[in-house]
Amino acid sequence: MSEGPIRDLEEIESQVIRSLVNFKGKDILEVGCGEGRMTWNIAAIARSVLAIDPNETSIDIAREQTPAKLRSRVAFLATGITGVDLADNAFDIAILSWSI
């Protein structure tokens, strides 16, 4: 049984993803953002991030913990992917991390 949220304390996953994908200046959809573990790393270089997760508590934590300098770039929604109406071509990149 888990003893709490899984963490990537060394941010190895973030480093690998950023080495493979150019988020700079892009509009990003993050599916299953949880408490924002990847969101802030992406938002630091992206133009915008829509971060969604069906767990309202996780979304509340993510909003609360988002650094002030990134808040204008990130929108959080408590919903699953089938519960949000997304316009065609609204995002340059969609990312899922630990969501499946």
Image (spheres, rainbow, N blue to C red):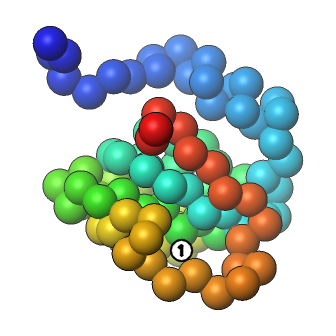
Task: Name the residue nearer the viewer: 83 or 3.
Answer: 83
Q: Residue at x 64, y 87 (%)?
A: 87
Q: Position of residue 3 (x, y in %)?
A: 15, 15
Q: Position of residue 41 (x, y in %)?
A: 60, 43
**With 71 as the anchor, is 53 left or right in this view?**
left
Report helix, strand or loop for mark 1.
loop
Residue type (three-letter) at the residue carrying disc 1? Ser
**With 6 as the anchor, is 12 left or right in this view?**
right
Label 1 packing within 10 angstroms: few (<14), some (14-19), many (20+): few
Q: Residue at x 72, y 33 (%)?
A: 17
Q: Quadrant of the N terminus?
A: top left
Label 1 sits on residue: 72
Q: Position of residue 86 (x, y in %)?
A: 57, 82
Name the quadrant containing residue 63.
bottom left
Q: Residue at x 17, y 55 (%)?
A: 57
Vertical arrangement, residue 7 with respect to residue 52, above or below: above
In the rendered image, is residue 64 in sight? no
Vertical arrangement, residue 20 with respect to residue 78, above or below: above
Q: Position of residue 15 (x, y in %)?
A: 70, 26
Task: Name the residue nearer the viewer: 96 or 66.
Answer: 96
